[in-house]
Image (cartoon, coloured by chain):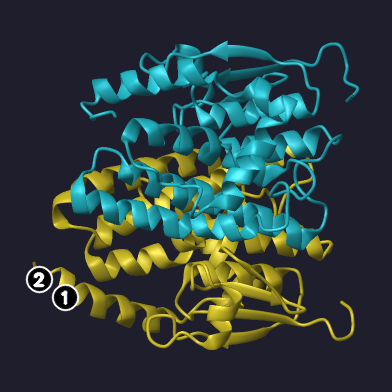
Amino acid sequence: MAERSETEEVKLLGMWASPFSRRIEIALTLKGVAYEFSEQDITNKSSLLLQLNPVYKMIPVLVHNGKPISESLVILEYIDDTWRNNPILPQDPCERATARFWAKLIDQQICVAAMKVVGKVGEERDAAVEAARDLLMFLEKELVGKDFFGGRSLGFVDIVATLVAFWLMRTEDLLGVKVVPVELFPEIHRWVKNLLGNDVIKKCTPPEDEHLAYIRARMDKLNIKSA
Amino acid sequence: MNQGEQVKVLGLWGSPFSKRVEMVLKLKGIPYEYIEEDVYGNKSPMLLKYNPIHKKVPVLVHNGRSIAESLVIVEYIEDTWKTSQTILPQDPYERAMARFWAKYVDEKVMVAIWKACWGPRSEREKETKEAYEGLKYLEKELGDKHFFGGETIGFVDIAADFIGYWLGIVQEASGVTIMTAEEFPNLQRWSKDFIDNNFVKEVLPPKHELAALFKAQFGSVTSD
């Protein structure tokens, strides 16, 4: 358990259904850091959020002893740099670089490709699904022979990739198209089972029923047909 | 550096991403072998081997292991060679701020500038406004500091190399003006100091060659 002074103040401005917000909760919980969670209404942004993240105006924002940090990958690295127990990133520079590379691929390409599947039909959808699968295949290959991306235990890439496990893969049922079928992605499916066996992940993942109801409601609002 | 330590950079002469890596290696006094890649023509077997996922430059190859993505490479160089010239601050909060602003330059400002200059005509006004606003945030963040990194060149300065050198040339060639000296005095001052740095100067592509490259590109664009 990290030792900290009594006046240490950790606050997280987040949103219960956001994968980016949940990542931060996982990291803080893994390191045993006590924090105050402030649920934000992203459709009606608070003046506090706008003050603490004027550039992006988005959650999550971590506030540590009054100093705000935004952008989930930046926050994760800050947490690892500040609370040195249970490291999230590997020690070896080459492995660290590889972890950062995968995180970027997930956020900048896989996430974007997955979003492109939503609201599409027919040939357009097929093409979007194929593009997403091509990228996911890199993650599939990376998992061969490993329990987690981090090796024997959870690491940086696993935390970032929860976006795939609990957002992309949960939305599949609602979209009516399996972007990540087990026949094509047996390693990813095995990895998700490993994730679900971890107490911290279980604690920090939105409850499935509520989550699906929320996604369905959002799809309805955006006039996207749900299965 | 160890005997037999081998550092190779696969790069592209005109690319700001490629140059970020070379700047940092020069700043830290790390010798390397540079290999020019014909990225738009014939990608070499070496490039396809060392960056199979993106097939892009820059790629750093160190003792046979490869790293891709310019800012990931810069952090790798920082993690691996502990020299007196550091690129990132020691303090975790300062490091986080450096990473935040570098990401902002890379993912928002540069993208908006690209689209403002090269994007579909219908989008250019919107993208120019976004690029302008992004540069305003950077102008404010820089303030009266010598560099984004303080007294010496740091992570954000390296990430912003396009703004420091390429942007002026692109603006001239495209006729799109986003950053002016009057509206961005801090960035103007910073860019002069940045490109005047000996290590940065050493790797920057010649202005006339870049200008010719962009004029050729924009020649076809401005006709629509």
Q: Which mark is residue B223?
A: 2
Q: Residue at x 38, y 81 (%)?
A: B40
Host chain of mark 1: B
Q: Is residue B9 visible?
A: yes
Residue furthest front as drawn: A183
Q: Which mark is residue B220?
A: 1
Question: Quadrant of the image for the N terminus of chain A?
Answer: top right
Host chain of mark 2: B
Q: Are marks 1 and 2 in contact (CB under 8 Å)?
A: yes
The x and y percentages for residue A104 are 55, 51
The x and y percentages for residue B135 are 41, 46
Q: Residue at x 76, y 16 (%)?
A: A34
**Which kind of residue does numbered mark 1 sit on?**
Ser
Shade representing chain B: yellow
Question: Which of A148 and A93 lies nearest the eye of the viewer?
Answer: A148
Q: Residue at x 71, y 37 (%)?
A: A78
Q: Which mark is residue A29?
A: none
